[in-house]
Image (spheres, grey):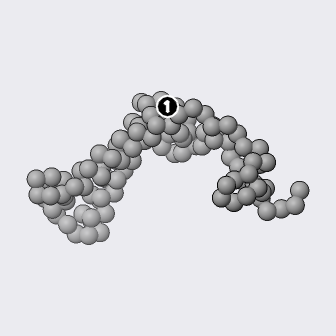
Amino acid sequence: MNADPQQRRFTPLSRSGYPPSSGREAISIGLCWMVLTVAFEFVFFRYAGGHSWSELLGNFNVTQGRVWVIVLAWLLMAPYVFYRRDSSQPAQPQKNGSEISPVTGPATRNCQND
């Protein structure tokens, strides 16, 4: 199944689909990812794991060597980083199935006889 790379896919966290159409939308996707991750962490480890609130907040203390904040920062920034990377690259030409790949040889279509 060859999908059009320019086709936008719908995701529940983005009204217009993915990939994001603007930097602001990319940041909002990252913000949603980060908030949902932190909410899951606090709810799960508080109620299922039985950890205290001070213990949970201690996981954000960088001075004690806790690097979880870096992971959360990456969750926030990653959609924007990839949006910028992808929007700065020229669009790749469409393959029509007749190109020869240096790795696999001639391109095949869905392993079925046409």
Which residue is denoted by mark 1 in the rendering? Answer: 88
Question: Where's residue 16, x and y in %?
Answer: 55, 35
Q: In this image, 20 relative to 42: left or right?
A: right
Name the residue located 57 percent from the left edge and 32 percent from the top edge: 90
Query: Which amino acid does the dot numbered 1 rest on?
Result: Ser
Q: Is residue 35 above or below residue 26?
A: below
In the image as oriented, which residue stretches furthest toward the front? 102
User: In the rendered image, which quarter contains the C terminus?
Assistant: bottom right
Name the residue located 49 percent from the left edge and 31 percent from the top edge: 88
Q: In this image, 84 relative to 65: left or right?
A: right
Question: Where's residue 8, x and y in %?
Answer: 60, 39
Along the line of sight, the residue nearer the viewer: 56 or 109: 109
In the image as oriented, which residue stretches furthest toward the right? 114
Along the line of sight, the residue nearer the viewer: 14 or 43: 14
Along the line of sight, the residue nearer the viewer: 63 or 49: 63
Name the residue located 30 percent from the left edge and 58 percent from the top edge: 41
Q: Is residue 35 visible?
A: no
Q: Dot 1: within a 10 Å radius of its alpha carbon, few (fewer than 14), some, or many (20 or more) residues?
A: few
Q: Is residue 3 visible?
A: yes
Question: Where's residue 97, x and y in %?
Answer: 77, 48
Q: In this image, 18 relative to 55: left or right?
A: right
Q: In this image, 83 relative to 63: left or right?
A: right
